Amino acid sequence: MQCLPCAMSSPGARLQPQSAVGWRGGDHWENLVAIPCARLHRGNRKQFSPLRVVCKDYPRPEIDSTVNFLEAAALSASLRNAPRPSEPLKIVIAGAGLAGLSTAKYVADAGHIPIVLEARDVLGGKVAAWKDKDGDWYETGLHIFFGAYPNVQNLFGELGINDRLQWKEHSMIFARPDKPGEFSRFDFPELPAPFNGVLAILKNNEMLTWPEKIRFAIGLLPAIVGGQKYVEAQDNLTVKEWMIKQGVPERVNDEVFIAMSKALNFINPDELSMQCVLIALNRFLQESHGSKMAFLDGNPPERLCTPIVDHFSKLGGEVRLNSQLQKIVVNDDGRVKHFALTDGSIVEGDVYVSAMPVDILKLLLPESWKEMPYFKKLSKLVGVPVINVHIWFDRKLKNTYDHLLFSRSPLLSVYADMSTTCKEYADPNKSMLELVFAPADKWIARSEEDILDATMQELAKLFPDEIAADGSKAKVLKYHIVKTPRSVYKTVPDCEPCRPLQRSPLRGFYLAGDFTKQKYLASMEGAVLSGKLCAMSIVQDSNSGALLPVLPRKTMSVTR
């Protein structure tokens, strides 16, 4: 492990520079925190001398010339440059998460008029956030933006908000349960992929031994040689089953795959499809900056979702909050007649899109649709529960980094000190830890007090000198816990054939969501890409005349 010296919102909401926190050059900021240097980790941990380490944001990586980025850019351009319709379609979209907002953005780029209906009073879906009475934000999840998210990165560029991503050093940092309070790092050097990733693994001797690394590498050879065809064929195996089949040591699961599985899908390796892990590894190993991470500089509804809404609103679209879909009303031929809302109103348009989570969609399916193969196979897609925990402490914690941290805890997945990593949440004197509590299936029904107590017990292991489970050290000033009973779909074996295309067999009805067919699985990138693919399907059908039977045109109407 290396410390940095060894290795190398709305504007009004941001804190002004003070104490140890400051901004320079507009885009960069630095935060002085005390963390132990790796060179001192050989002896008794309590004898370590803390170092003042400069933590800063890094320049945006050079990702614009990668194949995947250019492919995503070409898809965006094809929608912007699509032939203008003689009369724009009125497209009603249920759901204002990233999938629904992405759909709206790209159909508007193609010359059509999106109307987005959102059940709640906040934008974002799985990236929603709320402000408490003190003005502090708490979020649905801890969201990380990877270099290997080409459609998300294009979206930021198209909206002119690239500067809202705070890029961190190219490292992956894991807590060490065997040595409480210590961390192990995978530092990626400035080399082309896959050499940077290989060297990062080879240089780390704290988590895997050389024989374990060699056996792990041999196990991965078929994926490297077989490419995408091999990756897709592993959908029928869990991570644990794949490891046994490939002769990968059990310690690789304990040291790497448990943390990776919980970060990818909030479940353990004995449930997760190996295809999911291989897709992530494939992206990270193919692109030099694929595994590089960025934090959004503030709350997602204002810093990401609102710019999307502003974009398509200028093109004639709109969002209606507090507009919950109650029923998809269909004609005798099975096509959508209108969306009925819980307030008694109905919304009519030319085209309809469900960008709702798959679990909600299944509840709202009309009876006449349920036995259709396209919809029937959705039964295997089930959202996984997850809990996001936010804890404000009375002091600035020292045993942390300006980065995402893998806890390797049995109860926690990843966490970050958001008072250090995020400009809008910055505080030089007090820490706010945001933690993903997963797997959460046995905890989702438990009380917030139980969840907080369990979290504090785990934090006492991660911060042994600073946090005690009984609260005798750092004091909890307040906390917020956000439960999501059904989050992203659970990527268990044999799910891939059940993921639907964005174009349904019913003329004029489409789906968007990370559960739909696209190559980035359950992620923000998958949600954004699904919206683009949904928009492309609508535009193609409109231009080809496939939507003509929907006419005569309905004007967008709301009746009660």
Image (cartoon, rainbow, N blue to C red):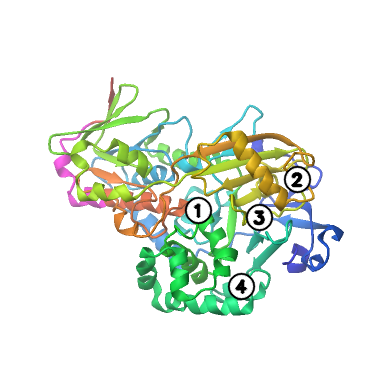
Q: Residue at x 27, y 39 (%)?
A: 352
Q: Dot 4: within a 10 Å radius of its alpha carbon, few (fewer than 14), some, or many (20 or more) residues? A: some
Quadrant position of residue 77: bottom left
Q: Dot 2: within a 10 Å radius of its alpha carbon, few (fewer than 14), some, or many (20 or more) residues? A: many
Q: Amino acid at mark 3?
A: His
The earlier-in-sequence mark between 3 and 4 is 4
Residue 201's label in the rendered image is 4
Residue labelled with disc 1: 157
Q: Residue at x 19, y 52 (%)?
A: 544
Q: Spatial distance from mark 3 to mark 4, Cα to Cα?
A: 19 Å
Q: Amino acid at mark 4?
A: Ile
- Position in image of residue 85 (x %, y %): 25, 45
126 horizontally vs 382: left or right: right
**Vertical side of 340 occupied by 43: above or below:** below
Q: Are marks 4 and 2 in contact (CB under 8 Å)?
A: no
Q: Amino acid at mark 2?
A: Ile
Extent of the magenta region = 539-554
Which secondary structure lies at badge 1?
Answer: helix
Q: Quadrant of the C terminus?
A: top left
Which secondary structure lies at badge 2?
Answer: loop
Residue labelled with disc 2: 467
